[in-house]
Image: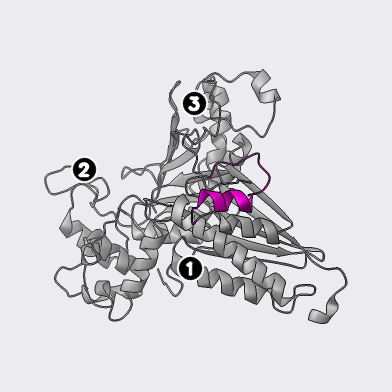
Amino acid sequence: MFRYLRLKNRPEKIVPDFGVLTTEQLARNPDTPLTLRQINNLPENVKKRAYRNLLSPNLLTKFNIHPITWKDAHGEQCVAIKAEPESGVVEISAHKPGDSKGAFFTLEIADNTFNGIDLNLLLLNDPQGPYFQTDVDEDGQATLFGSLHRNLEEEQRAFQAGLAPGQVRPSLGASKITLQQLEVFLATLGHQAYFLEPLTYASAWIFERRGFAYVRGHQLMDEIQAQFQPGGRLQQALDSSTPFRQPKQNCSVRGRAWAIHDGILEAIDARWNNLRMVKQIGRHAGVNTFPEGIY
Amino acid sequence: MIEHCQIARAAEFESLSDFRDFIKTTCAGQAGIDDQTCYDLQLAVDEACTNIITHGYAGMNPGTIILSMEIFSDQVRLTITDFGQPFEPSETPAPDLQAIMEDQEDSGFGLFFIYQTMDDIQYQTSEAGNQLVFIKKLLPGDESQT
């Protein structure tokens, strides 16, 4: 325990990163986590064996992609990995054979400052669903999920079609199986947790349901919940001043998410940034900041 | 194990009453847990969470505190998990009341109290957060409390 309440000045790294992974290191304590950089420094085919665990076989076979070869019936390669040697980042994406509108699955994970794991990106798009050009503005510039620029016309169409901010297509509905798969992979590496920064209110709410807790931002989520109640400042700011601030949007997760994406948090002198969530491997935190929430 | 319950709240002072209520509700009707034991657990969690709120999550929009409670036939095990700045563990086994008084600081009494009332205290940090565990032994065979 501790005698006095003194914060650690320099939090230690979770994993000692030796760069190159040797059989000797693997044979040592199996509880010591491995970094992605160590995996990325392995030969290509060894990497492929390791990263195959990031993709749910059921998800691939749903699109007639072979779970081992990652090819379709015509021999087209449908899964791509970016995992450069010396890099601590891996991106894996899968596209439906013959679909030119992008991947249905994109996942990027990375070693963080403390050699823990950050889930940087998870995109799960239904390739059968309609496409909305919210990722590119009227001038053809990337919107970065609406965080840098906005394509208001397309966003309005997406909103009316039932999408959440940041989505270009309806969701694939595979976040549960994907995150379970990720946990198995990270447990194999020896990690006890992983982290992410939720892009939108809707994604934070989904990650809560998947068992995440907050490193930062739980109080903000509580404040949002309180102020969207009848008479609250956010509820009052749903004044139809923009298409994304219509009355009754406070009743649903997506409605709140679009209003927040539209900057409604100014009404409580807050911004949607700097939230950070954590998932403990094998544990559900039980956080629920919008208990009566419907998506 | 007889019972395992968990609650997660934001690390803010408003959550302390939820934690107290959670402990009271979980203890209610459990064999071997009398009112004094329940009160000791509430106060220990109150002190520990106050420290996490005040120091661990200082300077940021606070994250989560997870309180889990496992009740066995011979002991209660309370685990407080947070994801703020970890505390510096010490080799020194327990705070010394005399030293706290000599320091003439307001802080320290909470820790002293925790050491006085809990049978075992463990603290560890990992990438999965900071875990503070309180163990309170229960009196054997006292079924009359139920």
Tell me the chain of label 1: B
Give the Cα distance between marks 1 and 2: 41 Å
Which quarter of the rendered picture does the C terminus of chain A lie within?
Answer: bottom left
Q: Main structural element of the magenta stretch: helix, strand or loop?
A: loop
Side (left or right) of A241 relative to B64 = left
Side (left or right) of B112 relative to B1 = left
Q: Residues within 10 Å of mark 2 (few under 14, many from 20)?
A: some
Q: Quadrant of residue A263?
A: bottom left
Residue A4 x %, y %: 56, 47
Q: Quadrant of residue A107?
A: top left
Give the Cα distance between marks 3 and 1: 40 Å
Tell me the chain of label 3: A
Give the Cα distance between marks 3 and 2: 29 Å
Q: Is residue B92 magenta?
A: yes
Tell which of A129 and A235 is nearer to you.
A235
Q: Which residue is mark 3?
A: A37
Judge whether residue A35 can be spotted in this image: yes
Instruction: Please check whether the numbered discs 1 and 2 fall on a single chain.
Output: no
Mark carried by residue B15: 1
- Residue drawn at 53 percent across, 25 percent down: A17
Question: Going by the picture, which residue comes out furthest to the front?
Answer: B102
Question: What range is drawn magenta here?
Answer: B87-106
Question: Going by the picture, which residue comes out furthest to the right?
Answer: B141
Q: Which residue is mark 2?
A: A142
Question: Going by the picture, which residue comes out furthest to the left?
Answer: A139
Side (left or right) of A136 relative to A7 = left
- Residue drawn at 43 percent across, 55 percent down: A172
In front: label 3 or label 2: 3
Instruction: Work out whether mark 3 precedes mark 2 in sequence or the reverse, and give the earlier one.
Output: 3
Residue B114 x %, y %: 64, 58
- Give amino acid for label 3: Arg
Residue B82 x %, y %: 53, 53
